[in-house]
Image (cartoon, rainbow, N blue to C red):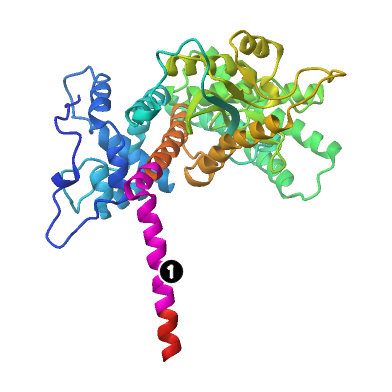
Amino acid sequence: MYKLQTTVQLAFEDFNQPIGLKMNPSNRWIQKAELIPWAELEKDYAKNFCNKKGNVAKPFRMAFGALLIQKEYSYSDEETVLQIQENPYLQFFIGLPGYQDAKPFDASTMVYFRKRLDETTLIEINEKILVFNKKKDDKDNDSHDDFNSGTLILDATCAPQNIKYPTDTELLNDARTHAEKIIDVVCEGKKLKKPRVYRKKARRVYLGIVRRKKKAKKWLRAEIRKLLSFVKRDIKVIKEFLEQGILIPLALQGDWETLQKVYEQQQFMYDNKTHSVAERIVSFHQPWVRPIVRGKQKAAVEFGAKFDLSIDQGFGRIEKSSFEAYNESEVLVGAVRHYHDRHGCYPERVLADKIYRNRGNLSYCKGRGIRLSGPALGRPKKDEVREKAQDYKDNADRIEVERSFSKMKRCFGANLITTKLKGTTLTSIALSVIALNLSKLTADFLHTFFGKNQKFYFWKQLAVFKMNFRDALFVQ
C-alpha cells in the first residue's frame, strides 16, 4: 500500500528546526534537494503500488534520498540510517518535516528501496532530473532537424563485484559444502540415515591444496580430480533422493542448480585441459557474475557488470548494462538514436574507442552526416592527409568520459559493488551515475549562485588579509 504525498517538494523554510539549531541554506544537501523534481517522481513512483491494503510504504523521497546518501558516502545500510538520524541536513534531504532524534526507518528497509527502484526506473529518474535542470540557453534545437549539432561521447567499463578471486579449488569446495548441506536438510526432514560422502577426507584434500605454497600443475590436476569425485558423489546421492520422490526445499533449489552447473563446467575444463568455458560461473553465491576481459594494466580480467556510458553536454546516461561480455560496438546505433530523441537532431560528432569503428557503425554515421572520430579502417591511403589538430581535439574531448568513470569509481562506489542480488547490483550502478550527475549540477548551481565577481572578490579579500597579517607580524 502506498499513500501519495501531497507536500513532497519540502522547502527549506518549511523545515522545522528546534531552538538553538540554525541550518545553513547554502548547504550542498539543501541545494541538491532543489535539483530533483520530487513531485513528478512521486506520482510515477506511486503507480507501482496497486494493492490498497497492508502497511503503508515509505515515501519516494525517503527511499531515493537514502540511497543517494548511501552512494555519496559508501555507507553500509546500518551506518546510513545512523547518519540520517544524526544529521538534520540529511533529514531534510529525505523529506522529513523537521529534525527528529529517532531513526526514520529500519536498516533492513534499504533492501526494499533498492528492489523497488530498479535499474529501468532509475534510468528514467536520471533523465527527468536532467530535463528538470536543463538551462534555458541549452534548450534542444527542435526546429533545426536539418543539420547535426553537439557531441556524443561513448565508452564502456566494468563495475567490479565484491567477490573473492575465483579459483577452481574454491568453486568445487563451495559446491561440495552446499551439496552436503542439501543432503543434511533432506535427511533431517525425512528422518533418513545420512549416507557416507567422505566429508572429512574431502576437507583434508581441500586444505592440502590451499595451504600448499607452490602447486605443480601435475599435482594440482590430480587434486582437482579428487575434488570433482567428491562433488560427483554428492550429486549422485541427491539425485537418488529425487528419484525416490523426495523434494529439495525451495530455499535450496537455487544452490542445487548452481552446484550442478559448477560441476559440469569444472568437469568440462578438466577433461579438455582448458581454463575457459561458456557462461563460466566465478562465484557460487552470485552465479550471474561473469569474467570481463578489459586488458587493463591493473587487472586484465574483472568480475562484475559491464555497462556503456554516454556523455551528452557533460552528463552521463547508461546506454546498456549486462553481466555478459558483450561487444561495445552494438551500442553505438542505439546511443545515437537516443540522442536524436532528446535533441531532435543527430550529433555532429561521436567520440568513441577504436572498437566502435566497424563497417556497420561507420556506414550508419556517414549516412546521417555524423563524424565518427578516429582513422579510417584498413591501411592508410597513399595521398591521405590527416588533420592532426582535429584528431588532437577529439582525443582531448573524449577524456571526459574517462574522467566520469574515474569519479564514479573514486567517489560514488562504482569501483566495488557490495550488493548481493543481481537486480540490486544494476541498481547500484545506476545510482552511481545519478550521483555523478547531481554532483555536477550542484557544482554548476553553486558557481552560478556565487558568480565570478564574488569569487574574485573573495580571493582579493583573502590576499588583503594575508598582507595585513604579515604586516602585523613584522611590527611585532
Q: Position of residue 360 (x, y in %)?
A: 67, 10
Question: Residue drawn at (54%, 19%), measured in percent from left and top?
Answer: 347
Decide which of 443, 463 is in the foreground and name it: 463
- Left or right relative to 231: residue 247: left
Magenta residues (range): 444-468
Q: Quadrant of residue 368?
A: top right
Question: Residue drawn at (69%, 37%), measured in percent from left and top?
Answer: 169
Decide: few, some or many residues near mark 1? Use Cα within 10 Å; few <14, some 14-19, many ≥20.
Answer: few
- Left or right relative to 180: residue 120: left
Question: Residue drawn at (36%, 49%), measured in percent from left and top?
Answer: 451
Q: Does residue 153 show up?
A: yes
Q: Position of residue 94 (x, y in %)?
A: 26, 41
Residue pushed farthest bottom? Answer: 476
Residue matched to label 1: 463
Does the magenta stretch mainly form a helix, a strand or a loop?
helix
Q: Position of residue 53 (x, y in %)?
A: 16, 21
Q: Does residue 288 show up?
A: no
- Left or right relative to 422: residue 452: left
In the figure, 345 relative to 3: above or below?
above
In the figure, 319 relative to 21: above or below?
above
- Residue 457 drawn in magenta: yes
Decide which of 369, 221 is in the foreground and name it: 369
Which amino acid does the dot numbered 1 rest on?
Answer: Ala
Question: Residue drawn at (61%, 16%), measured in percent from left and top?
Answer: 330
Decide which of 437, 55 is in the foreground and name it: 437
